[in-house]
Structure formats: structure tokens, C-alpha cells
Amino acid sequence: MFSFNYLHGIDVYLQLRTHGQRVNLGIDKFSTEKPEEENFAQKMRQVVCNDLLLTHFFDLIEGENLTSKYADWKNIGAQALISAEVRIKKENMVFKGKLIDLGTEEEIFSKVYEIKKEYSPRSEVGWSDLAHRFSDDIVFRFSGEEGIAQSKIIFVNDATGYKEVYLIDYDGENLQKLTEEKSLVLLPRWQPNRKGIIYTSYRNGNPDLYQLHFNEGKRKPFKVNFQGEPLLQYQGLNLGGSFSPDGKYLSVTLTKDGNPEIYLFDLEGNTVRRLTRAKSVDIAPSFSPNGKEIVFISDRLGNPQVYLMDWEGLNLRRVTESGYCDSPVWSPRGDLLAYVKRENENFQVYIFLIKDKQEKQLTFFGSNENPTFSPDGRWIVFVSNRNGKYELYRMFIDGSSQQRLVDLPGGCRTPSWSP
């Protein structure tokens, strides 16, 4: 029989995946008590369906005309059943999600999720977030891995005539504008704790590094010293690369000493060390998941290529051998690098399998740039001009399932997926 406890559920899931199968999940109609709850119930159910289908772990059986009897669901092939209740009360919305093992007819888990009634479809934590949280809990119960449904994506968009930073849910919903620089903004990047971002702004004429904390809702210089002077606002280029996984260090590209070089700063804005010392352009640093290595771009031997070095700046080695490369990022699993390579005038997204030392091209149409990995390392978001302007696209790490993530006015660049 197909039955679950937490660890057994993971074991069954792994067995099915090993044999190329997916878990068949029934998803019942979400119950309500009042007419005003029905619309939310339908939308939340659709969000859960979309979340679970995107994982490629499950096949969903909707069974709209079925009763809630477990035997009916088992007869059409469901191995587990999702059900939920939506209730709108005076001060909050309550969402109770449940997952049933149809082999034993016992609960795998049942959980209550709540938000205050001042919810909004455009708020960072709204009704859709309740559904995303439920989806992630289902994924975790089956796979033992954290889901990505609650993750967010930041990016630059120029619809207002300026380049500003925007935020969307991982599925392209709930667009929010984060900055009002009314200028040129570059390379927004997440802080590891997801409580804020950094970005470079030309608002004051020089490309300076700023930070935005979500709980404060306003930007400020990355750090100031004891005299109150802003740091990482040197004359010339100040570009944030990436934070170390533990959040203690930030790799940046600066031109304060001449040509672009990579430096390491702590979170107080103190220089830890200069990492590169070549008469070349060294840019776009990205930390490995274990914090021990940094991938970056250098043109020290001609065209820009992908290089690796230890986080101290030692043990330099070249990864790519051809083309014009840019925008390297490390997979959260540590097994892949993603970057873009220009050949025949267009950029294409590539991945490099570190263990096998093999390169694979993932995109082939238009120009495709700025790859960023999902938190579980299974998806890549990038920008593509294949339809005439740069838009956000999503694909699986083998290059399959390429599709536009969201339809927005203006052009989009430099996305960054939250940790």
C-alpha cells in the first residue's frame, strides 16, 4: 500500500522519481462558508495547483465532480489528497490545508495559515502567500527539500523612463516597485536573510552602492563609517557582486585603484582584502554555496572568460575557453555554473557542469542574458529579447520548459532570485 509518515513519504517519493514517475495528487475543491470566501478559495486553489505542477514532482487529479470520499479518489488513481478550508473573519483570513494519505486514509499533515484582514493581492504577504506556504509544506513532506513557492525575484525595469528595481513573486505575480531613484539603477542583489537588497544607483551622478531594507522601506548608503561618511561610494564604479552564504562578506567591483578589480568587504563596510591584481577588467563576482570559492569574469587573456578563485583570491583557474562571456552565477547546489556567452552577435545562456567539466548551451533564440538560479537550483530565470524587447523568462536547468515569466511594459534586466 502507498502510505506515509514523514520519512516514509520521502522514501516513496524518491523511489517514484528514480523510476521516472510522479506522485499522483488529488486536489479537492477548497471549502468555504460564505459567498465572499468563494473567490479567494478558487484563486488559492489555482495557486496551489500551479505551484505543485511547476515542481515536476507531481501529477494532479482535480476531480471537480467527485465527493470527498477517499475511495472515489483512489479509484481514479490518486495516491494522496489535498483539501483546504478558507475562512474570512473580522480581523484575519484563515486558511487550513490538509494532506491525506489515501493508502491509510490518515493525515500526512494538517496546518493552519493566517494573515490579518488588511491583506492585498499586491502586498508582499497576502492571500497568495498563504497558498504558496501550503505548497511549500507539501513539497517538503514529499521530498525533504524546501520548496520555492515563497521565493521572490528582483529585477530592473525601465517602463517609467528610468531604470528602477521591481519585485515579483517567483511565479510572476504581485508586482511591486521598490525604488524611486529616477535615474539609472544596476544589478540589484539579495541579502542572504532576504530582509533587503543592494543595488548601484547613478542618482547622484556616480555609480554608488546602496541598500534597501524592506522593514524600513527606504534606501541608504551601503554603510557609513564612524565619521558618518558613506562607504562603497568611491569615485568611479561601485558594483555589488554577491554576499557570502553566511552573510558576513560582500564581493564588489571597484575602479578606485584604476581598472575594475574585485574586492571583499565585511558588512561594516571595511575592506577585508583586494582579490584581483591584474591589468585587466575583473568583474561580476559570485560566491559558491560553501563560501570557499568565487566565480568571476576577466579579460586578462583576451576576450572576457569565466574564472574561479578561492575566496582569499588564490588558486586562480580558467573555466571557459571561447566566446565573450559574462554574468556568471553559482547554482545553490554547488554543482553548476550558469553564464552567458556571445557568439554571432547574440548572447546565449550556458551551464558548466563542475564535476564533469562540461559545458552545455541552453538557449538558442534571440539574445539571452543575466541568468539567476532558483533557491533549489532546479530553475533559471533570465532575460531574453526573442520577442523584440528584453523580458523575464524561466526554464528548467536542462533548458526545457522555456516560457515568459510575466508580461510587463518596458524592458527588464538583471534579475536576482531570492535565496
Image: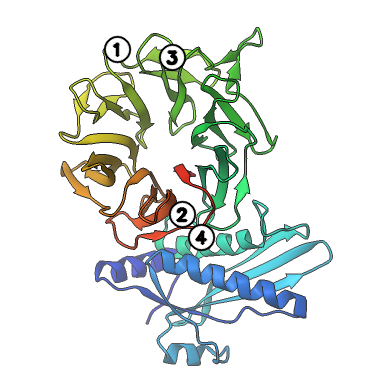
The residue beneath circle 4 is 136
Residue 41 occupies which quadrant of the picture? bottom right
Residue named by callout 3: 272
CA separation in Å, label 2 and label 3:
33 Å
Residue 55 on image: x %, y %: 41, 63
Q: Is residue 130 above or below residue 360?
A: below
Cα separation, mark 1 vs mark 3, equals 15 Å
Q: Earlier in the sequence, mark 1 or mark 2?
A: 2
Pointers 4 and 2 in contact (CB under 8 A)?
yes
Name the image colouring: rainbow
Tag 3 secondary structure: strand
Residue drawn at (66%, 62%), measured in percent from left and top? 127
Mark 1 = which residue? 277
Residue type, label 3:
Val
Above or below residue 73? Residue 387 is above
Between the residue at mark 4 and the residue at mark 1, the CA separation in whole angstroms equals 44 Å
**Label 2 crowd bin: few (<14), some (14–19), many (20+), radius 10 Å:** some
N-terminal of the two: label 4 or label 1? Answer: 4
Callout 4, which amino acid?
Asp
Within 10 Å of disc 1 (Cα), the crowding (few <14, some 14-19, many 20+) is: some
Could you say which is closer to the camera, residue 15 or residue 65?
Answer: 65
Q: Earlier in the sequence, mark 2 or mark 3?
A: 2
Residue type highlighted by circle 1: Arg
